[in-house]
Amino acid sequence: MLNELKKNKKSLNGWVIDHENDIKQNKEFYKSPLLFYVKNGFVICEEKRIENEKMSGVKINWKQ
């Protein structure tokens, strides 16, 4: 699906949780998808972060 989006767009943006400290309802740790996106050509925009009581994440960007 990601490759299909890349075919029709010049740039893609998203927000990703960049740590594995959160625990899911089933008591397992949430696995961050950050490495998946990096392997698919996304760049981490470290200066753009979301930090609040509900989540902590970083912006990612892919450009053609």
Image (cartoon, helix red, strand yellow):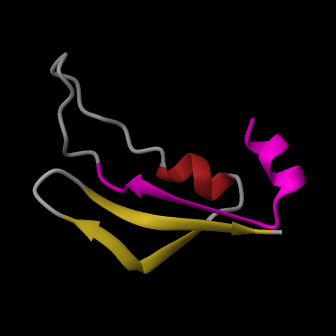
Residue 11 is left or right of residue 15, and the answer is right
Question: In the orientation shown, which residue stands out farthest toward the left?
Answer: 53
Identify the residue shown where x is 19% and y is 16%. Answer: 26
Q: How many marks?
A: 0
Residue 43 is left or right of residue 57, and the answer is right
Question: In the orientation shown, which residue stands out farthest toward the right?
Answer: 7
Nearest the viewer among 22 and 53 is 53
Image quarter of the N terminus: top right
Q: Does the magenta-highlighted stretch encompass residue 8?
A: yes
Image quarter of the C terminus: bottom right
Percent from the top left, x then y, of residue 25? 17, 21
Q: Which quadrant of the view contains residue 63?
A: bottom right
Highlighted magenta segment, given as a residue range:
1-19
Q: Does the magenta-highlighted stretch encompass residue 2?
A: yes
Percent from the top left, x then y, of residue 13? 59, 63
Question: In the orientation shown, which residue stands out farthest toward the top?
Answer: 26
Percent from the top left, x then y, of residue 47? 40, 83
Where 12 sits versus 45, above or below?
A: above
Q: Which quadrant of the view contains residue 29?
A: top left
Where 13 sits versus 17, above or below?
A: below
Identify the residue shown where x is 28% and y is 45%. Answer: 20
Residue 15 is left or right of residue 28, and the answer is right
Question: In the orientation shown, which residue stands out farthest toward the bottom?
Answer: 47
Identify the residue shown where x is 46% and y is 67%. Answer: 59
Nearest the viewer among 31 and 56 is 56
Identify the residue shown where x is 17% and y is 33%. Answer: 23
